[in-house]
Amino acid sequence: MKKLAYVFVLIFWLAVAAAFGQCPPGTWSLNVTLNPDQYPEETSWYVMTFFGDTLMQGGPYAGIIDYEPQYAAACAPIDSFYIVVNDTYGDGVAGSLWGGNDGSIYVEQCGDTIWSLPVADFGNQIYDTIYTSGCPPPPPVFGCMDPSYVEFDIAATLDTGMCFTPKIYGCTDSLAYNYLDSANTDINIDSCMHELELTDLAGNGWAGSSLKLSQATNLVPPLNYQDIGTYTLVDGFDTTFFVNLAAGYPVRVVFEITQQSDFTAVQCGYSLYSEDYVAIDIEGGFVNPIPPFFPIIGYPYCGNTCIERVYGCTDTTALNYGYLANTDDSTCYYLAGCTNPIYLEYNSNADFDDGSCATLIVLGCMDSTAYNYDPAANVELPGSCIPFVYGCMDPVMFNYDPLATAPDTCIPYVYGCTDASMFNYNINANTDNGSCIPFVYGCTDSTMYNYDVLANTDNGTCIPFVYGCTDVLAINYNVLANTDDGSCIDVVLGCTDSTAFNYNILANTDDGSCISVVWGCTDPVAFNYNSSANTDDGSCIPVVFGCIDPTMWNYCDTCNTDNGSCIEYYYGCTDSTALNYDDDANTDNGSCIYPIYGCNDPTAINYDPDVNVPDSSCEYSAGCAVGDIYTLPNPCFAWVIDVDEYCCDVAWDASCVSLYEYCQDGWSGPTDLIELRHGLWIHPNPTKDYLYINSRLKVDLTVVNMLGKIVISEKKVNILDVSKLTPGTYNVLIEHENIRINKKIIKQ
């Protein structure tokens, strides 16, 4: 009871550990996924140990959505388990039987599926074994583990000498203002300390004038500047202030003149710089005169932080000096004026338009005696003046002269056919309009059969209408008709004999194709198919293939068509359990020789001369009194007779041999209680060829390799041939009635 209680507690905590994603050492998560059919309330399952303890379970799933996947997990050691799936209706999870979808169940460990439901329609219950193997350790991650190299991999667990490129810090953005082409690694420093140094060339101080320092909080115009502080120089000495500035954001400096004149202000200077970079340097004094509140812009730099380029005019002498710019874009201009050449005020030397363009240039003829004199023109267009030329100047007239500059008599257009050979010739026309129509002869009477809509001159050829069938292929064709009246009847050829096989009820003209009715089997795959028959009489007999030779072993008395499958009689032993079993024999001749298991050692007390298959059943004297090899003080023999006193007092039987072999193999503890209780011991272990069950009972044996694959499965045996197995460790499941024992064996 104590053992069962311990197992229950262990299973409880393994399930809890799996639910939280962590398993104790020596255990691995076992995951179950159940995809139900449209009847989830019918399905339940559980996984249990070979001791009958439940490891995990699920269902029935009443109240869930149809087909909704269900999950469960528990921590499990390397062992074998039973899985049982139940269905209360008796159709498994075969939802397709009722118009839905089949369900499925998967058991996974370490990302691999170790068991799945073999068939959806398993009835009321399916019972199977799950074999676990544990998870392999994760593979090493090769890479550079030195953070001072570009190839550094934070995920690497094993350095393989893959560090090649030392890091060179700097701005790697080729579009940045401070791009460093030799750099391969960026360091983004948010801010750093700058020195603000105030100077005075005369050495008498700033007399109350000051610098106001502010910095932008954004990079997209309009910029929002935040005040940092106001600074002044006193007593004529250089003064240095330390200010923390954000890297890359513009800094604005305004020199505020209070008590000084513009002349004395030029003696003042200042610089702003970090450890690595000078942002602003006005050491030589301000430009004279300097207007109050004129802003100076600089860009703080902190080590390797990239500074965004701001394009514009960087020349302070230019009219369009851009105080925000740090990169000149060649847009500076210096002379204002009219830059548009279409105005009289145009200045070719000006590079900036100041709005002085006022008078548009008007090109034209400025000669007042010319035909096209333009009083509005202010610039003579060479060669533009035109003299007076008399003529018709109306472009819609017949005699229009495009060269005329003075009006004369005009003649209007008279359109028509100017060709005298045409049907509609117009003697008054002076301009041909393309309307000429030639003479077209034909019947011009619209009531006639041959009326010609194109004819304009009748030639006496008119023919009256004659109505009838004009189709020469019709059965009622009228040779005199020239106009079809829709009365034609099509000729339909075919068999007109109603007693014929191919009688055509639609035919009106017999073509001599009638075929007589021939009764018979018309199915070409039938045994009695009649190729001459055209009408099936229901007499078809299906083809039944097989051996139709009555002298053959596999003769089929219901077959009518031989398929070449006949097999001759071959006599021999057909019992696979016999020693002389003949795999080629199909007819037993009573020659089988069956194995007789037992002891064939003449020195044993149970020697049997009839034995033809020796086993490990030989029994020997315990030797307690006759000096046998199993004598005290042999510690292994002492342990055996301590466990089983009958090994000395009665007989050295198979149980004693099994205990001794376990002892000799290094077994130092008591035999499994279940094994001792039920006498189901498997030996020898390790083994080369055979495994024996000391019990006289026949048991079910299943051998599973370490990958969970069944390699041997035998029913009702007490000897198992393992000689063909690959050397290694295997799990052996011993089953007899309600007893289940799982043992590990070593195949040498």
Image: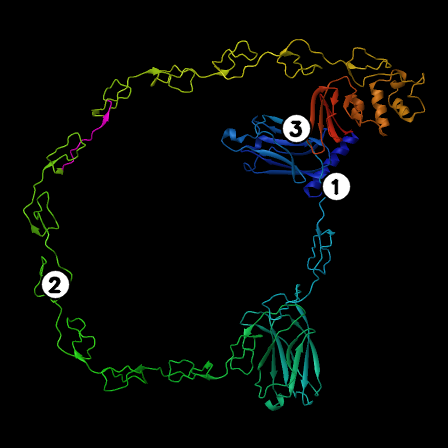
Of the two numbered discs 2 and 1 in the rendering, the one whose residue sits closer to the viewer: 2
Instruction: Let me know if residue 305 is in the magenta part.
Output: no
| Residue 615 appearing in the image | yes
Q: Is residue 106 left or right of residue 560?
A: right
Instruction: State left or right for residue 103 relative to residue 359.
Output: right
Using the rendered image of the protein, determine whether residue 259 is visible from the camera's viewpoint: no
Picture quadrant where residue 373 is located: bottom left
- Quarter containing the N terminus: top right
| Location of residue 729 in the rendering, given as x and y in whole percent from the top left corner | 76, 31
Q: Residues within 10 Å of mark 1 (few under 14, many from 20)?
A: some
> Which dot, 2 or 3, sits closer to the camera?
2
Q: Which residues are magenta?
A: 484-495
Dot 3 lies on which element?
Answer: strand
- Distance (Cα) linking label 2 and label 1: 113 Å
- The three-letter amino acid code for the residue at tag 1 is Pro
Marking on residue 416 = 2
Residue type at tag 3 = Asp
- Disc 2, disc 3: CB below 8 Å? no
| Secondary structure type for disc 1 | loop
In depth, the one of 482 and 682 nearer the eye is 482
Which badge, 2 or 1, is on the more N-terminal residue?
1
Instruction: Please identify, in this view, whether the residue under mark 3 or under mark 1 is nearer the observer.
Output: 3
> How many residues crowd mark 2 within 10 Å: few (<14), some (14–19), many (20+)?
some
Q: Residue 147 occupies which quadrant of the picture?
A: bottom right
Q: Which residue is mark 3?
A: 128
Measured in 3D between alpha carbons, the distance from the residue under mark 2 to the one under mark 3, in whole angstroms, is 108 Å
Q: Amino acid at mark 2?
A: Gly
Determine which residue is flagged by label 1.
24
Identify the element where label 2 is drawn.
strand
